[in-house]
Image: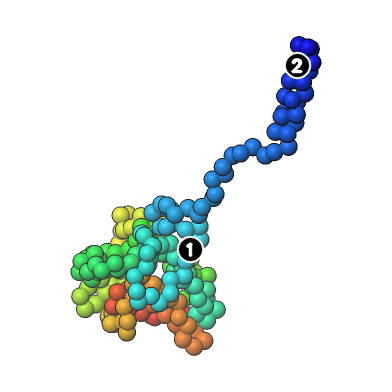
Amino acid sequence: MMTKLNNSFFVLVCCVFLAGCGQEPAVEETPEHPNHHATTKEAMEPAGSLAIGAQSEPDTLKGSLKAEAHGMIGPAHVTVAYHSPAVRGRVIWGGLVAHNQVWVTGAHSATSLQTDQPITIGGQPLPAGKYALFTIPGEKEWTVIINRNWEQHLADNYTEAEDVVRFSVEPETATQHQERLRYEVVPEGQDKGAVVMTWDKLKLTLPVGV
């Protein structure tokens, strides 16, 4: 009698075991969600440089965005590489950007101006190469500086002895608010054009020729 009971119990256990093997484990999988917690560093330093467009309204991006402006002026390919800060309701001229001090004309690393052909800028000759673009903002007139040392942080290592070109230009009032600092390389005919910087309600035009 005991042998029959043992055999029946064994068969029952085997059946339960085999039935369980045919089912998937009851594990609750966590669904994947997009990363909603991107760091400020990721926002400030995207994998590639952006092209900043006309922007009258604030955005939700944090920090100063890495950006570039490209264009052809005659046979010369001109590139401006910079970091683009936003206004975000702040006083820019005479506030965030001090008057009568050398400014990186952007943020973080020195803004660079590169040309693959000799050009003139502000009516002065500039050989092909890569340079830092600094300015000294004034209330009525700005000094524009093209400096050999393009690879520096802000204007920390700026020295006038490395200036290649200096000229003065009067800023204009922009037709509309520009939230993020923007550069454009603008051709004007076959052998001239301009590098144009706009930010807040200010527009600065640097004449370029070939």
- Place of residue 112 in the rendered image (x, y in percent of width and height, measured from the top left): 42, 64
- Residue at 30% x, 54% y is 156
User: Could you tell me how far apart the alpha carbons at marks 2 and 1 are, in whole angstroms?
Assistant: 78 Å
- Residue at 32% x, 82% y is 176
User: Tag count in the figure?
Assistant: 2
Label 2 sits on a secondary structure element that is helix
Mark 2 Cα-neighbour bin, 10 Å: few <14, some 14–19, many ≥20: few
Residue 178 quadrant: bottom left
- Place of residue 139 in the rendered image (x, y in percent of width and height, measured from the top left): 20, 75
Quadrant in the picture for the N terminus: top right
In the image, taking residue 172 as reference, residue 24 lies left or right, namely right
- Residue at 54% x, 45% y is 30
Picture layout, residue 95 above or below residue 168: above
- Residue at 51% x, 61% y is 48
Residue 204 quadrant: bottom left
Disc 1 designates what residue?
Answer: 49
Query: Of the residues shown, which amino acid type is indicated by label 1?
Result: Ser
Query: Of the residues shown, which amino acid type is indicated by label 2?
Result: Leu
Picture layout, residue 152 above or below residue 175: above
Q: Which mark is residue 5?
A: 2
* Residue that extends furthest to the top in the rendered view of this protein: 2
* Residue that extends furthest to the bottom in the rendered view of this protein: 189
Label 1 sits on a secondary structure element that is loop
Nearer to us in this view, 153 or 66: 66
- Place of residue 79 in the rendered image (x, y in percent of width and height, measured from the top left): 48, 70
Answer whether residue 169 is visible to the viewer in this image: no
